[in-house]
Each structure stands twice: as C-alpha cells, then as structure tokens.
Image (cartoon, rainbow, N blue to C red):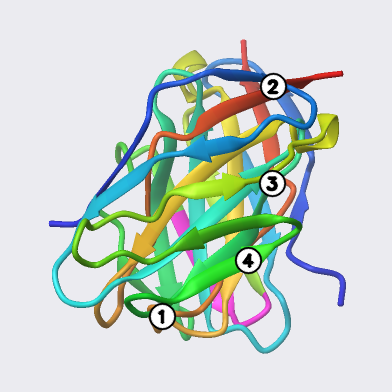
C-alpha cells in the first residue's frame, strides 16, 4: 500500500535560517506528491506539488523535487520567516480513484 | 470563488446527542472528502465521494458515523449518538476529480466538542 514518512518534529528555527523537512514515500504505480501547510486554526492549503519524477514544485520560496530514485520529496526554503510557522504535511496520490495519503505532519516554529 | 464551506465552525454538544456537520464543495468539483484531525491520531480520511457516490468508507470509525451526498453541492457527516472521543476537528475537502494530480481544497473545519 501507499505510505508517507516524515521526519519527527517539532522543528524550531530562527528567522532567516535554512529549512529542510524530509519526506519519503512508498507507493504503487507513479504517484503525485504534495506538500500541504496548515496555519493555526485553519484548514490545510496546498503549498506545492509535483506529478512526475524530477519535477520541482515551488511556491512562496519553498521548493521540493520529486526524486524517484530515493523515493523522496524533501521540502526546503532558503530563509524562513516567522509567518512560516505552521504544520507541514507531505502527501501522495497514486492510481485511479486514489485518496491522498498523508504523513503525520511536522510543526515548524520560527523565532524572530 | 468562496472555497469549500463548512458549517458550523464550532459545535459543542453533550454525549448521546446527534451531531450533523455540513459541507458545500467548490462548484464544479466532482470529488468530496471528509477528514478528522486529532492530536493523537493526526489526520484521518473518513470517507470520500465521486459524483455523489461513496467510493471508500473504510475510514469511518463506527456505525455511529454516516455520511451522505444528496447532490453535487452538499454533503453531511452525521454522528449518532456522539461520544466524548469523537471530539476533533472535522475537515471537508473537494477536488475536480480523483485524478492523482488534482489538488484537494480544504474547508476551514468544524471543531466538535462532545462533553
């Protein structure tokens, strides 16, 4: 079956620090990969996605590259801001009638 | 576009009462998903529909939970009778289709507290 593994959290960084959040997956077929973000008190929002190997998704300074050889989709940002404090979920979808499979999520806190 | 609309945003009820959560998906979206989020279990998919037909309800925890989608613009999730362990935030999401690349758009959630 499909599964997503995220690194353990929480993560606390100072403003302008470099961010990496690891995500690896197992899936049947050729999945599409997603990063969702959940700000406090809100629903999840799509941050970025990649639908095939070697694609790079990017948005709001965040990037993630679909690596089929390592089955990974790590999220990176060169300089985090306080406003990036949120919970980040890695997810995949694969196959027809497919549902999103989420990782457990990781809480990021950015200090001024 | 108004996005996915959920109501109520907050619900406080007593154990044993019936609770109905409502969702209006984005117009033109054919797939609808109900999730539950708790600190202990994280984000769980309860059930999803495509073209108003339930596709997979294997995530529904018990017979006390039921979901319907009578038309393309409305869905309900009902808990009867409710129990304290049902306390959670319930999210509804919609997408254009079930194609793997389609984004799911989430509503703001309903925070349910069962006393």
Give the extent of the magenta segment.
Answer: B67-73
Chain letter behind tag 3:
A
Query: Are the residues under badges 1 and 3 in a single subunit?
Result: no
Chain letter behind tag 4:
A
Chain letter behind tag 1:
B
Element at label 3: loop
* Contact check, label 1 and label 3, Cβ < 8 Å: no
Determine the CA span between mark 4 and mark 3.
20 Å
Residue A43, numbered label: 3
Residue closest to the eye, A56 or B81: A56
Element at label 4: strand
Q: Give the mark nearest the N terminus, 4 or 2.
A: 4
Residue A58, numbered label: 4
Which quadrant, please, contains the N terminus of chain A? bottom left
Please name the residue shown 78% across and 43% down the image: B8
Does residue B61 sit above or below A45 in this rendering? above
User: In the image, is B98 to the left or to the right of B14?
Assistant: left
Residue B98, numbered label: 1
Determine the CA span between mark 3 and mark 2.
18 Å
- For label 2, the residue is A109
């Amino acid at each position: 079956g499909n599964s997503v593994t995220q690194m353990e959290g929480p993560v606390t960084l100072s403003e302008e620090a470099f961010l990496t959040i690891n995500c690896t997956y197992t899936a049947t077929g050729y999945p599409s990969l997603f990063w969702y973000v959940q700000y406090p008190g809100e629903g999840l929002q799509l941050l970025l996605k990649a639908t095939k190997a070697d694609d790079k998704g990017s948005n709001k300074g965040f990037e993630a590259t679909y690596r089929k050889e390592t089955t990974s989709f790590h999220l990176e940002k060169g300089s985090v801001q306080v406003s990036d404090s949120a919970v980040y979920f890695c997810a995949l979808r694969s196959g027809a009638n497919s549902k999103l499979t989420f990782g457990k999520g990781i809480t990021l806190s950015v200090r001024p | 576009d108004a996005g996915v609309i959920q109501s109520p945003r907050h619900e406080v009820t007593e154990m044993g009462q019936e609770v109905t959560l409502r969702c209006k998906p984005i117009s033109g979206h054919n797939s609808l998903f109900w999730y539950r989020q708790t600190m202990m279990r994280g984000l769980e998919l309860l059930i999803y529909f495509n073209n108003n037909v339930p596709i997979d309800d294997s995530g529904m925890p018990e017979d006390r939970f039921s979901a319907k989608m009578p038309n393309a613009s409305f869905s309900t999730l009902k808990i009867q009778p409710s129990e304290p362990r049902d306390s959670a935030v319930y999210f509804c999401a919609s997408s254009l289709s079930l194609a793997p690349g389609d984004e799911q758009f989430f509503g703001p959630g309903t925070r349910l507290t069962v006393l």
